[in-house]
Image (spheres, rainbow, N blue to C red):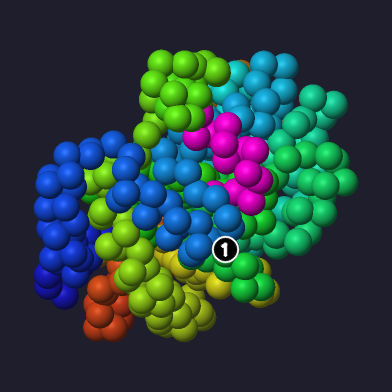
Amino acid sequence: MTGQIPFLDLAAMTQEVRDDIEQGWQRVLASNRFIGGDEVARFEAAWAGYCQVPHAIGVANGTDALQLTLTALGIGPGDEVIVPANTFVATAEAVVLAGAVPRFADVSPDTLLLTPECLEAAITGRTKAVIVVHLYGQLPDMGALRRAADRAGLALIEDAAQAHGSTWHGRRAGSFGVAGCFSFYPGKNLGAFGDAGAVVTADPGLAGRIRVLRDHGRTPGSHYQHELIGTNSRLDAMQAVVLTAKLARLDAWNTARRSVAARYRTALAGSPARLVAEVPGMRGVYHLAVVRVPGRDRVSADLAAMGVPTQIHYPIPCHRQEPYLRFADGRLPVAERCAREVLSLPMSPHLTGGQVDRVCAAVLEALSGEEHRVA
Ligand SMILES: Cc1ncc(COP(=O)(O)O)c(C=O)c1O
């Protein structure tokens, strides 16, 4: 096999939106309104509508989206927030930055996502909230998680940083919890040309507090009156233009990602390297195409030699990361095992059927002749 397959073809996505963005940036240059303004308001309205909620608040990145949500909910010192151990570190980091304590929960061996049972096992008398992470672009059973959170009186926050447009029984990621938090990091399904993020919520009071917090705690409409200790986490107009242009393509790109995933699923169905499972009623957007494979590091090296780049999301579960050891209070066997076995295959809306077939053939070749078992 020859030629490198891209892990993520950002250039092809940029090419599709280039003209729209250049026109939008001309408007921003003419207006000289670089922070906030019409472009940000337009994107916030479009993003709220897309997520099926009344309010969207643009912020500087996904970590701030989570931290500001926790702070605006009054969660801080003395409180615990449950997060799945299988996530990007920012989920737990935001809890610590808000002054609270992350408590790590294990995940399902099928979906690698949080379950009601794992959530319930982590609840203590200090637990105030749970952050459900839609990792890889997949939602868990949101009805069951919502019921479990309600039973325990916990605020349910969604970390939807990898799940722009995913649905569970027709409802969009971000619309289930008290708030949904998004990252628009460039490599996300909806990615800016720099850092950006947003919170979506149906709660007008929460939306208002996050708007104040993101802008130095400033009283809306005032110049130098500050009602809260906030921070600077504003979305800028240049990024809002990029996000509005890309939002128009998001559904088409997500559909293309689902086709790539379906092709992987079919071709690898009989092999030890199977895509992680989807829960019934869920329509994932495949931010990542993750398989579990014993002997992962050798398989990954073999694939690299065949021109197939892979990545690992994530090689160390959060509760085993050095700064978070002080919050870990026990083994989380599924998260620990999946950190040793997960492998992310190339995933882009622009991958061709031929490229996907080449990846699958390479995976099968890397696995051939070896004894592999996936529990
Ligand atoms: C699951 C998850 N949560 C939170 C974040 C943090 O987002 P950001 O990098 O925009 O701060 C990311 C992305 O990087 C993520 O993948």
Q: Is residue 169 visible to the viewer in this orientation of the structure?
A: yes
Which residue sits at x=26%, y=54%? 241
* Residue 263 vertical placement versus 245 (above, below): below
* Residue 117 vertical placement versus 368 (above, below): above
Q: In this rendering, would 89 be left or right of 360? A: right
Q: Is residue 89 visible to the viewer in this orientation of the structure?
A: no
In the picture, residue 205 is in which quadrant?
Answer: top right
Residue type at numbered disc 1: Gln
Which residue sits at x=63%, y=44%? 204
Q: Which residue is mark 1?
A: 52
Residue nearest the viewer, comparing 327 with 257: 257
* Residue 316 vertical placement versus 169 (above, below): above
Q: Is residue 323 magenta?
A: no
Residue nearest the viewer, comparing 238 with 179: 238
Q: In this rendering, would 303 be left or right of 104? A: left
Q: Is residue 211 magenta?
A: yes
Residue, far right? 151
Which residue sits at x=49%, y=64%? 50
Residue 69 in the image: state x and y as whole percent. Answer: 58, 35
The secondary structure that most of the magenta stretch takes on is helix
Residue nearest the viewer, comparing 18 with 257: 18
Residue 5 in the image: state x and y as whole percent. Answer: 20, 67
Residue 235 in the image: state x and y as whole percent. Answer: 35, 39
Q: Quadrant of the C terminus?
A: bottom right
Which residue sits at x=85%, y=41%? 152
Residue nearest the viewer, comparing 187 with 22: 22
The magenta segment is: 200-212
Disc 1 crowd, CA 10 A, few/some/many (<14, 14-19, 20+):
some
Q: Quadrant of the N terminus?
A: bottom left
In the picture, residue 72 is in which quadrant?
Answer: top right
